[in-house]
Image: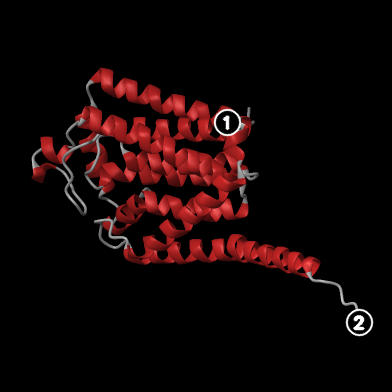
Amino acid sequence: MNARQGPLLSVAALLLILALIVWLSGTNQALFYAVNHAGHALPDWLWSNLTLMADTLFAVAVLLIAASLKPAMFNQSLLLLLLGTLFVHGFKQGLDIARPAAVLDRDSFYIIGQVLKNHSFPSGHSFTAMSCAGLIWLNSRSTGLGVVALIIGFAAALSRAMVGAHWPLDILVGSASGLLIAALSVWLTSNVRWLQGHGQKLFIAVLLTLAAGYLSVHQDGYPYTDPLALVMSVVAVLTALLKVWLPLARLLYRAFSSRDGGTQAPNRS
C-alpha cells in the first residue's frame, strides 16, 4: 500500500462520518443555509473561481500538468476519470435528488451563476476536486504540497454550497468518494499490469491535452472565471508541450533517423 493512502483514507472516513451525522440528525437544510449565508462574507468572484477549480475541465488541466511531471499519473488519471464518471453519473441519474433551488424559496439563499435544480447527489464538482487533490497527495513527495492540494480541493468542493448548487450532504459524500476512488485508481494501476501500458498513457495524454486546450473557451456558467480558465489552459498545454510532446517528437525523430541510416545500402565505390 502507498504510505500516503492511510491518511487519505482517514480523511475520507471522517467526511463519511460527518455525512452520516448530518443525515441522521436531519440538519442538511439548516446546515446549507448556515454555510451559504456565512460564505457571502467573501466576494462572489472567489466562490465562482473555486467552483471553476472543481470543474472537470479544470481538473483535467491540473492533472495534465502533474502527469507531465510524473508520467505514471497518466494511467491513474485515465482510470480515475472512467471510475469517477460511472460512480457520479450512476448515482445522479439513479437517485435524481432535487437541489436547493428546486426545494427552497429562491430569495432565502444566495445563488451565483446558473440555477440548477436536478441530479443533486452526490456533488460531481466535489468528487472531481477531491479526487484530483487526492491523486496529487498520493503522488507528491512533498507533504506540504499534498496538504495544500487537499485544502484547495475541499475549498472548491465547499464552494458548491456557496453558489447555491448543492446540499452539504452532497458535498461530503462527493468529496469522500473522490478520495476513495483516487486511492483505488492508484492501487489498481500499481498492481494490475495491463493498466500500466504505454498505449493507455499516450491515449490519456492526447485526451488531457485536448481537454485542457478546450478549457480556454469553456463556458462554465459562472461569472468572473474566464481569466483563470484561460491561464490554466495555456499553462497546462505549454507544460505538456515542453515535457511530453516535444521530447516524444525528438525521440521519434531519432528512432526514424537511426532506422533510415541503418537500412541504407553501403557505398561500394
Residue receiving disc 2:
269
Secondary structure of the residue carrying tag 1 is helix
Q: Residue at x 33, y 65 (%)?
A: 217
Q: Position of residue 80 (x, y in %)?
A: 47, 39
The C terminus, quarter of image: bottom right
Q: Residue at x 35, y 50 (%)?
A: 55
Three-letter amino acid code at the position of disc 2: Ser
Q: Position of residue 143 (x, y in %)?
A: 61, 42
Marker disc for residue 187: 1
Q: Residue at x 40, y 37 (%)?
A: 84
The N terminus, quarter of image: top right
Q: Residue 87: in sight, yes or no? A: yes
Q: Residue 150: in sight, yes or no? A: no
Q: Is residue 175 left or right of residue 118?
A: right
Check the image and report above or below for 267 versus 168: below
Three-letter amino acid code at the position of disc 1: Trp
Question: Badge 2: how crowded within 10 Å, few (<14), some, or many (20+)?
Answer: few
Question: Badge 1: how crowded within 10 Å, few (<14), some, or many (20+)?
Answer: some
Q: Position of residue 193 (x, y in %)?
A: 63, 33
Among all residues in the image, which is located at the extreme bottom?
Answer: 269
Secondary structure of the residue carrying tag 2 is loop
> Nearer the N terminus, badge 1 or badge 2?
1
Q: Is residue 55 left or right of residue 81?
A: left
Marker disc for residue 17: none
Spatial CA distance of label 1 from label 2 is 61 Å
